[in-house]
Image: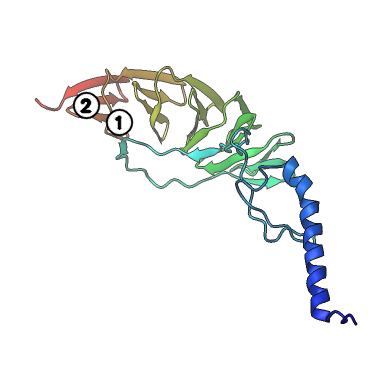
Amino acid sequence: MLSRPRPNQILKVLSVILGFSVLIGLIPSLIANPDQFEGDIYYYDTVGQNRNRPPQRPHPDLHVPTVPVKHGVTVFSNSPTDKTAYPYLQTTINFVEGHLSFKAFLSDGSEVSYSTRGEHVRYSKCNGDLCIIVSQKNVLGVSNTSTEWEKGHIFGEERYEVAMGHKAALVASDRKLYLFNSYTNHWETISLEQETLSAFANLYDKVAIITTRRILVIDLPREVQFEQNLLLRRISQFELRDGFMNFYAGSKLWMFRHQTEAFEEVDLTD
């Protein structure tokens, strides 16, 4: 008489059959994808959520675009040392940002509004007698003698540096300088030719701009410029005073006298 198979023997037979079935099912996928086990191994969550799956690395042949750097407006810092003793001057103008607009409130109580619809404001500030706005399209300025925001156009440049005085403001790009004159409510454009901005200073009605190639002194009420070539020298420090300006370059000093409106070259080694 044949003996009845035990339950544990039945389980072993079923396990062997199940193993053969799984192996037979995997053979086609192994033949079709012989390299599927090379490289990283990923774990699939049967619930449908890849909680345990590590981040995938892009294939070396694929180009993965990087996130573009957002350029903006930064505050300019003088590289030569500014020894000017600036007096305290109160800011006499203010603005309020409204819905798609800026409203400037002047010292006489009047209000000047500008619509920023279609523009992205990147910088705005008031100082002394003027306020400026920098957007992706325009530079804008207003002063206590303005009847409207004065607009200056900027084209195709993403990075700007801003310097504020009490009577003038500077917006500098890699190629141009945009100077706002609060006396005339006018934007003046100064091209940079094989030179970079080194310093900006504004004391009362005079502006000093130092580049790697020259010194510019600007009389704001008359919009007159005076220029001095640096002759390949580098200004290390400068000082603005009521009657003159001093610009030091090693043993050389360039002095600008307000009375004569001319530069004098002084050799400090004598």
Residue 29, percent across and down?
76, 46
Q: Looking at numbered disc 2 in the image, what kind of residue is underneath it?
A: Leu
Q: What is the quadrant of residue 61 in the picture?
A: top right
Q: Specify the quadrant of the image occupied by residue 68.
A: top right
Residue type beneath disc 1? Gly
3D distance between C-alphas at marks 1 and 2: 16 Å
- In the image shown, does 234 or 257 lie closer to the viewer? 234
In this figure, which residue is indicated by the disc labeled 2? Answer: 253
* Nearer to the camera, 74 or 43: 43
Whichever of callouts 1 and 2 sits on the residue coming sooner in the sequence is 1
Neighbor class of circle 2 (other Cα within 10 Å; few <14, some 14-19, many 20+) is some
Give the residue displayed 43% in from the left and 17% down from the top. 193
Q: Quadrant of residue 259?
A: top left
The residue where tag 1 is placed is: 243
Q: Secondary structure at mark 2?
A: strand
Q: Position of residue 45 (x, y in %)?
A: 74, 60
Q: Point out residue 239 in the picture as x, y percentages from the top left corner.
A: 29, 35
Look at the numbered disc 1 and give the secondary structure of its residue. Answer: loop
